[in-house]
Image: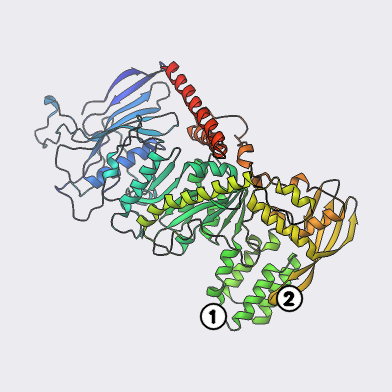
Amino acid sequence: MEESSLCCEQLPDGECIEVQKDEEDDGLIELDCQNGFPEGRKEFVAPAVGMEFESYDDAYNYYICYAKEVGFRVRVKNSWFKRNSREKYGAVLCCSSQGFKRIKDVNHLRKETRTGCPAMIRMRLVESQRWRVLEVMLEHNHMLGAKILRSVKKMGNGTKRKPLPSSDAEGQTIKLYRALVIDAGGNGNSNSCAREDITFSEFSNKWNLRKGDTQAIYNFLCRMQLTNPNFFYLMDFNDDGHLRNAFWVDARSRAACGYFGDVIYFDNTNLSNKFEIPLVTFVGINHHGQSVLLGCGLLASETTESYLWLLRTWVKCMSGCSPQTIITDRCKALQSAIVEIFPRSHHCFGLSLIMKKVPEKLGGLHNYDAIRKALIKAVYDTLKVIEFEAAWGFMIQCFGVSDHEWLRSLYEDRVRWAPVYLKGTFFAGMSAARPGESISPFFDRYVHKQTPLKEFLDKYELALHRKHKEESFSDIESRSSSPLLKTRCSFELQLSRMYTREMFMKFQLEVEEVYSCFGTTQLHVDGPIIIFLVKERVLIEGNRREIRDFEVLYSRTAGEVRCICSCFNFYGYLCRHALCVLNFNGVEEIPHKYILSRWKKDFKRLYVPDHSSGGVNDTDRIQWSNQLFRSALQVVEEGILSLDHYNVALQSLEESLSKVHDVEQRQE
């Protein structure tokens, strides 16, 4: 074989590159082909214009996997290199039957395999430093084979492309991206959407999907991307080209993360409970106390590797968002992934998720009812660590359950779930630290254990639409009406003017319950800090009340008030005990630090996104898109308040679009 020829070509900026034209079997993956397809073979997702990959190797391996499934050999037809850095800049991968041999190169001892086959993909390194597919030809003009034997032929310069060891090949991930548009021209037609099947598997782990489900999810993602601005999805393939994980997030969810990404509930209950849909969701709480979706995923298995992939993808999509608090189920694989991806976040186990498992884990024990009551008392009724430890020890000793494995492991993890250990952690109302409270799944009433994937995908947009409608209605109601005041307390009047209706009503209940508190007395003085004791008549079983003591720290100079019940950290507003102390000291307004902006009725209008100190990244289009969408969403939120608001907002958006078009015309 002759040595590859080199020629020079000019980049747009004038920098020279070298183009290597690969002839014959250079870079060839050889297949032992047989005519026809074996019955039952699953087809791989076909290449499409607009696909993006993190590296050239990812793109190369993806096309090899596709060729392996379809039944043809691949050759690197052209490679573009920058002359100075030797960095690869572009490439064309084609079917090995592409072109025709020159007469002088014909070897009469070997059968001619060239047919001038047009099948190929052309790709290029783009501004985002990912490899984008720019041109695709899927059709072949010859018979295809299906039995594949991977081997590598010698290259012209004597080097070889090393095949991956089998163990490495099995574990390698091929990362497939979709661009923000299907192709450069915005054309939504993609041959890849016409494929019949995609195989979802991860070694022995396979998604138990019904016929047509694989195509349904792929069509769903493509449709959402075309109809939803700033929609993002990512699909994770194993080395055999089988899709094992998927993640997607719509534009509203990406914007919502900027507002409400401080506390996140990562819900993997469908996956851990073996639902038909292995769905995981990122859920936050908005300024009305309503759940808001921050991303969705489908995972093939509960492994640290899968969770790492999902969390990294979410962080990248959300421009590096790192939540203050993450709430999850007790899962060792997930815990390991969170430690690596979010080392500075407070990782807590959902208390309500633990308490739901009490009947399952303890139901078979003798004296179950008594054990359950003792556990509830230890968890919910203790205010100090020493009290919790004493109550837990009493339960273990009294009922002889020291050897119970679940209780033992639960005690070992107590700093992540017991309220007495989490008083310094901010939960924004997602802690469920009171009896009977729970964190509801975002798709509650839409997904049960046997819900088919197609049904969920059909209901996905309906669920989001209802949630968005609920939030919009609450926005309008909070902005256009004033809540009914129930007391003459100045604190109630103060927050009625600031907070959304739903959050004010929760705070209003604390104001009303101030009257169940009495006997505010000074317990201890340490310079400017005073410890007060507040007594409260607390309702218990049988509508009976008992008196309990609550210690409250108060510092007038620092404007600080902290109750031992830690209501502010758990729920985001001051408790009745803290209000009693403020009132006792003649304070007529709640200190500024205890009025959270995230509960204000105009929070989304006043909120200024954190652009990570330094302005906009010149090359990060995801960051551009997120920030533009948030700004546009603020106009939308204001525009729905009245017809006059709507007309002004619409006119402003049209004028902005016209100015953007002017920039485009000047550049042309």
Callout count? 2
Which residue is depicted at the point 80% across and 47% down? 589
Percent coordinates x, y for residue 546 in the rendering? 77, 73
Residue name at image x 32 percent, y 18 percent: 8
**Which residue is farthest front?**
643
Relative to the observer, which residue lies in front, 387 or 477?
477
Q: In terms of secondary structure, where does tag 2 sit?
A: loop
Which amino acid type corresponds to the residue marked 1 in the rendered image? Gly
Q: Around disc 1, counting alpha carbons within 10 Å, would you say few (fewer than 14), some (14 to 19), or many (20 or more)?
A: few
Observer-nearest of 491 and 125: 491
Q: Is residue 359 above or below residue 617?
A: below
Q: Can you name the residue that lies furthest to the bottom here?
A: 366
User: Where in the figure is residue 92, as x and y percent of width and height?
Assistant: 29, 31
Instruction: Identify the residue position indicated by label 1 in the image.
Output: 364
Residue 544, numbered circle: 2
Proximity of marks 1 and 2: CB atoms separated by less than 8 Å: no
Q: Position of residue 385 (x, y in %)?
A: 73, 65
Q: Position of residue 17 (x, y in %)?
A: 37, 21
User: Is 112 on the left or on the right of 321, as rendered?
Assistant: left
| Earlier sequence position, callout 1 versus callout 2 | 1
Element on which disc 1 rests: loop
Q: In the rendered structure, which amino acid carries the disc numbered 2?
A: Arg
Label 2 neighbour load within 10 Å: few <14, some 14-19, many 20+: few
Is residue 293 visible in this depiction of the protein?
Answer: no
Residue at (49, 35) in percent of width and height: 622
Q: Nearer the viewer, mark 1 or mark 2?
A: 2
